[in-house]
Image (cartoon, rainbow, N blue to C red):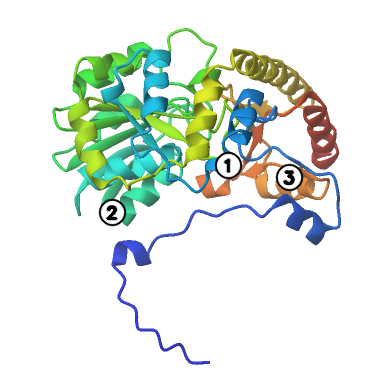
Amino acid sequence: MENRLKLTVSENIASLVPYPPGKPIEELERELGITGSIKLASNENPLGPSKKAVEAVAGALANLHRYPDGSCYYLKEKLSAFIKMPPETIILGNGSNEIIELVIRAYLKNGDEAVMADPSFAVYPIAVKAAGGRSITVPLKAHTHDLAAMSKAITRKTRLVFIANPNNPTGTIVRADEFDRFMKKVPDGVIVCVDEAYYEFVRSAGFPSAFDYVKEGRAVIVLRTFSKIYGLAGLRAGYGVAPPEMLDYMNRVRQPFNVNSLAQIAAIAALDDREHLKATLDNNARGLEYLFREIKALGFECVPTEANFFLVKVGDGRKVYDGLLRKGVIVRPMASYNLPEFIRVTVGLPAENERFVCAFAEVVR
């Protein structure tokens, strides 16, 4: 059948490669003829959502005919007390992904540049290119942001710098002294976007306080999310913290009612659930200790991590991924991040971690 559509698409959109979504577990099991598979691919919380959040959502279902609070007033007030930053410095989004796009829409013009590490979060270059911008990528150094090289990559065309801390997909962090030296070199008018989606998992000393730069009125926005440690990935809620002058322009391009009612209610309740937070951190710490020990015993190298996931250097990442998949263990191959020798593994429940180790040992042998 002849395609009668005659579409005019900008070159920056036409040349984009879409973010590849994974198939539902049920569909993978049907295709492979397996059952009872486990997913250790998307850095989700294996403990699930906070029970307090689930109860709060259940109690709000009768009000779904009402539009959400477009200002996220109560969630902003709760966050303000929780992170000790004024409500006017907080913006809410449909996941922190939306806030990345709001920053770009508000401050990046056609032909402008954004500096970022390579590899880092895949959404940065996609969103920049969609807006007509140009991504300037700086290779990681020892799997970590090379801030000295990133500062040298800033030019008169640079409008944004993205720093994922901890970095996805490597799990490594930028430390306070490095970050301070970098910030001293950033020219006025360049916005530094610090993506702290996994900051709650960081255990090492020396993690920078990016909020301090917001308090100083610097052009810095800090991104955080309820998807990871709070286990609310399915509801999509994230927030940014920046000087009010910056948020003013971002709110001008933000859609009304961008954070749904259930996401707001769940996030408020999750902030009160300290037990769930502690249980998640304990599970992650024990899981990393076990997994690193067992993988090392099998003769393989793991990249040290400060997140709830880690990289394993396996040689042929796609082959190991396929082998694990056929045993019902879903991880993430890293070829799309230019790391074809690696797989990325999310820390699971103890039984899931043990199953991964057993399946991994069989596949690599």
Q: Are marks 2 and 3 in contact (CB under 8 Å)?
A: no
Q: CA distance from mark 1 to mark 3?
A: 47 Å
- In the rendered image, residue 116, in percent from the top left (x then y), is placed at 35, 37
Task: Find the residue positioned furthest to the bottom.
Answer: 1
Comparing 340 with 218, the one in front is 218
For label 1, the SS is helix
Asked if labels 3 and 1 touch by Cβ distance under 8 angstroms, the answer is no
**Does residue 309 appear in the picture of this structure?**
no
Tell me which amino acid carries mark 2.
Ala
Residue in front for this viewpoint, 94 or 214: 94
- The residue drawn where x is 36% and y is 49% is 127
Residue at disc 3, secondary structure: helix
Q: Amino acid at mark 1?
A: Ala
Q: Nearer the viewer, mark 2 or mark 1?
A: 1
Q: Which mark is residue 62?
A: 1
At 47% from the left and 29% from the top, the residue drawn is: 197
Residue 320 - label: 3
Q: CA gap, disc 2 to disc 3?
A: 36 Å
Query: Mark 2 or mark 3, which is nearer to you?
Result: 2
Q: Quadrant location of the C terminus?
A: top right
Check disc 2 and report the residue beneath it.
131
Give the structural element (helix, strand or loop) at label 2: loop
Q: Is residue 338 above or below residue 279?
A: below
